Image (spheres, rainbow, N blue to C red):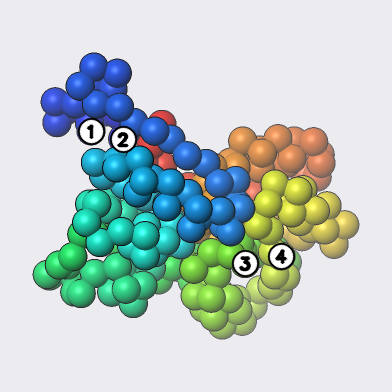
Amino acid sequence: MFRKALNEAGYVEGQNVMVEYHWLDGQYDRLPALMAELVRSRVAVIVIPGFGAGARAAKAATTTIPIVFGVAEDPVKLGLVASLARPGGNATGINLLSAEIGAKRLGLLHDLVPKAVRIAVLVNPGSLTAEATLRDIPAAARALGLQIQILRAGTSRDIEAAFATLVRDRADALFVAPDGFFASRRVQFATLERAMRFPRLIPIVVTRRWAG
């Protein structure tokens, strides 16, 4: 979608625009160094899709290079913009509202799989959406009569360990909290689900994709 939008705006990658792609694979401690490198490279614009921590790191690194973000959290609370109506500064973008609708997603999961009672909830402890998920999901689960098990993963190995845990504990379904890292690992989720051969497991992965 990102490339398509560029093309529609008259920018063709490799012809009149060059795009550098950087992946953290959950290693958020690399953000300051990465952003500093981009600033030194004098890039024309920094695009941060669905990644609040990345947007904040970019904002901290530069006040002049334009930043375009897509975040699940309130960009005002994140300190990215002064207000939604008048962003100001060098950052603009959209609020995907993913953090605010976690309870609704859990309700949809319950509607889709009404017999699922034991729900494993996977969150990324390094994500800015984790706090909202851990705050809203338990209350919604109690209202629906569901049992919640919180699992945390910030790396690919953590995801493997989380799957081993939920299989061992015989969870009925997996609720994956919205997070850019999880979205980038959706192939790993599908591969692990098939490898575990656990018929009662129903992974529900919420994805957001801009680039690619």
The circle drawn on residue 151 is 4
Residue linked to disc 1: 5
Which mark lies nearer to you, 1 or 4? 1
Q: CA distance from mark 1 to mark 4?
A: 36 Å
Cα distance between the residues tagged 3 and 2: 27 Å
Label located before the other in sequence (3 or 1): 1
Side (left or right) of 132 relative to 98:
right
Q: Nearer the viewer, residue 81 or 58?
A: 58
Q: What residue is shown at x 72% (from left), y 70% (from top)?
A: 149
Q: Quadrant of the C terminus?
A: top left
- Cα gap from disc 1 to disc 2, whole angstroms: 5 Å
Q: Residue 15 appears at what percent x and percent y?
A: 23, 17
Distance from label 3 to label 1 (Cα)? Answer: 32 Å
* Residue 137 percent location from the top left of the image: 56, 74
Q: Is residue 109 visible?
A: no
Image position, residue 125 (x, y; %): 62, 67
Local crowd size for mark 3, using a 10 Å CA cut-off: few (<14), some (14–19), many (≥20): few
